[in-house]
Image (cartoon, grey):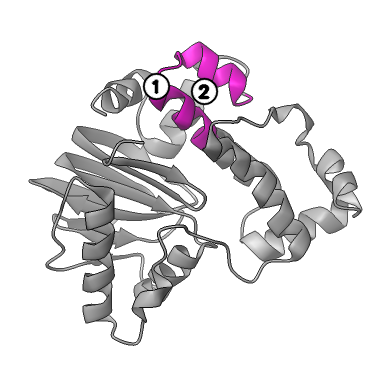
Amino acid sequence: MPANFRLQPGLFACYSQMLEAGSHRHHAIQLTIPDGSAELAIEGATFSGASLLAPNVMHQLDMESGWVWLVEPESTLGEVFLERLNGDTCISVKALSCDVDINQQFDFVSERIEKQSPHLSRHRFPMETEYVQLDSRIQGLLERLNQCFGQVCVKPDHWGASDVAEDVALSESRFLHLFKENMGIAWRPYLLWRRLLCAIGMLNSGKSATESAYMSGFADSAHLSRTFKQHFGLTIREAIKLFEQH
């Protein structure tokens, strides 16, 4: 995997150039690390440097070059970022250097967060992100979904709530309640999010929009493009151009 791209459980990180993302929101926490001019706009405020954005906040981003990290709130890294946000919608992360190599960038992020929040221990910044305090049945479900990150895409035909509930030996209503209680998001929108990440992996590997849509469970490339725009502020065509940089 290129040093300027990372897709793994709990984390999608991409270094891009000339990024222009229109208004959108997503379940993930967003860490933006500009390497040049940038403007992250939310209601009532703009940020020009590195910033940390809470989940489900409408925003748009224009960035000359730099990193965007999307971190699931329920991951170990997400837990650290939420603690750093401390209930704020968006905060500046001052004096955070930018490097095109993900491993070096991770070190920079760890060091900067520690300096601003000394009580957060360095050992809580694992590159292999995990999920925290989850019911074992939900943890097992996520591990099955995580197979997509190993380029072995899990066919999406049997991910309906009733099918999954049967697999984990729960009633559908109990499964839906347990999942939302553990993950902070309902099953259906979370599954949509994971399908989008699966599509990103496919696109980055050189698959066409049509192939990526089919393999990740979307009706067609138009459906994928609409959903992509809602969650990332980019069309599929724009996203493919970004992935071609890697």
- The quarter of the rendered structure image containing the C terminus is top left
Element carrying mark 1: helix
Element carrying mark 2: helix
User: Closer to the camera, 30 or 80?
Assistant: 80
Q: Is residue 166 left or right of residue 93?
A: right
Q: Which residue is mark 2?
A: 224
Residue at screen point 24% across, 43% down: 61
From the viewer's perspective, is residue 21 above or below residue 182? above
User: Closer to the camera, 90 or 82?
Assistant: 82
Q: Amino acid at mark 1?
A: Ile
Residue at screen point 67% across, 66% down: 134
Question: Is residue 189 visible in the rendered structure shown here?
Answer: no
Quick check: is 207 in the magenta stretch?
Answer: yes
Instruction: Give the CA distance from mark 2 to mark 1.
Output: 8 Å
| Residue 53 rendering spot, x and y as whole percentages | 34, 59
From the viewer's perspective, is residue 104 above or below residue 157? below
Whether residues under marks 2 and 1 lie with C-beta atoms below 8 angstroms apart, the answer is: yes
Q: Which residue ends up furthest to the bottom in the rendered image?
A: 119
Q: Is residue 143 left or right of residue 114?
A: right
Q: Amino acid at mark 2?
A: Leu
- The quarter of the rendered structure image containing the N terminus is top left
| Residue 211 rendering spot, x and y as whole percentages | 53, 14
Q: Which residue is mark 1?
A: 236
Q: Which residues are the magenta region?
A: 196-217
